[in-house]
Amino acid sequence: MAVQRSAGRAPATKPAAPKGPPKVSKAERRTADPNGAAYETDDPETLTDRAYRLLEELIVTLALPPETVLSEQSLAARLGIGRTPIREALQRLAREGLVVILPRRGILVSQINLNTQMRLLEVRRELERLMAKGAAGRATQQETELFATIARGMRRASDERDDITFMRLDRQFNELVSQAARNEFASRAMGLMHGLSRRFWYQHYRESGDLPLMARLHAEVAEAIARRNPDAAGRASDRLIDYIENFTRKTIKA
């Protein structure tokens, strides 16, 4: 059953449809195709986790655009997952601001507000520097290897201008930084911003963004963490936020 859309205005630039799953190493198999085919993984994943991951990607990549009306039943049919995990995933997405649950009216994909992005970035700068430095100082050997793998993937995405691979690696990178930083308070705060930030980027990067540069800047942060260099990780994080702030200002002016 198709997901119905409201009469809300569609984004000015329609993004390309998501491609099939990119080729990834075993260490990178932590994302899934939005059509429902999960990659192989050694980590156990609950149905709620899977439902959240797939729905978050559909929303962030605008396959479910702002103001889309969502139905638990249609989403369950689309993803091949039961309604209870779908409901729990939607509640998590609501906490993160990607959907709005309206009592007795339904569930909507939230709108994208240009003017809130700069306020969000003020918080992101401080938290991301803190977490990048923390991850560089506390990551395990296995985690540093994963950071190195993600960095290589980011550089490939940069060379190939592959937006979907970049988006998937970006989510892996964020999750790994949150894990390796060993700071649950910073991780919870950042978790509320990642999806909103990625969706804003995906909607506007064709107009004002530089995908290869964005991917390379992420790779530099991951590489500094992999080298266990907190100071370099902090500087690389600031360079990344500098670019994102400039991109956001250009988008607002446009």
Image (spheres, rainbow, N blue to C red):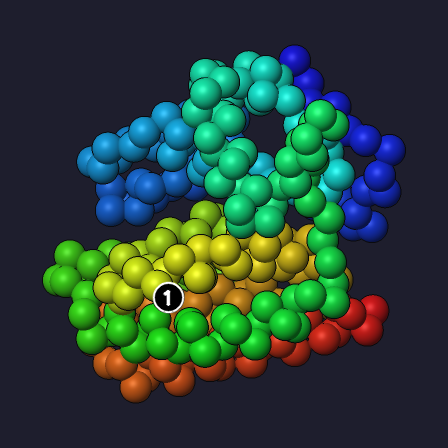
Viewer-closest of 134 and 88: 88
Seen in the image, is 219 located left or right of residue 100?
Answer: left
Residue 219, horizontal then vertical, whole percent: 39, 68
Q: Residue at x 68, y 31 (%)?
A: 103
Image height check: is 99 above or below 167? above
> The N terminus is located in which quarter?
top right
- Residue located farthest toward the front when viewing the structure as drawn: 103
Q: Is residue 103 above or below residue 111?
A: above
Amino acid type shown at disc 1? Ala
- Residue found at x 69% / y 65%: 116
Q: Is residue 16 visible?
A: no
Left or right: 206 as drawn, with respect to 241: right
From the viewer's side, name the closer residue of 65 and 170: 65
Residue ID at (69%, 45%):
110
> Which percent across, then down, holds residue 225?
27, 72
How many marks can you see?
1
**Does the image show residue 226?**
yes
Q: Which residue is mark 1?
A: 186
Helix, strand or loop under label 1: helix
Q: Quadrant of the C terminus?
A: bottom right
Q: Quadrant of residue 104?
A: top right
136 above or below 34? Answer: below
Residue 32 position, x and y percent, is: 42, 35
The percent coordinates of residue 59 (x first, y second) are: 61, 41
- Which residue: 74% across, 74% down? 250
**Label 1 neighbour load within 10 Å: few <14, some 14-19, many 20+:** some
Task: State left or right for residue 89 relative to residue 74.
Answer: left
Kindly indicate the quadrant of the structure image that contains residue 100.
top right
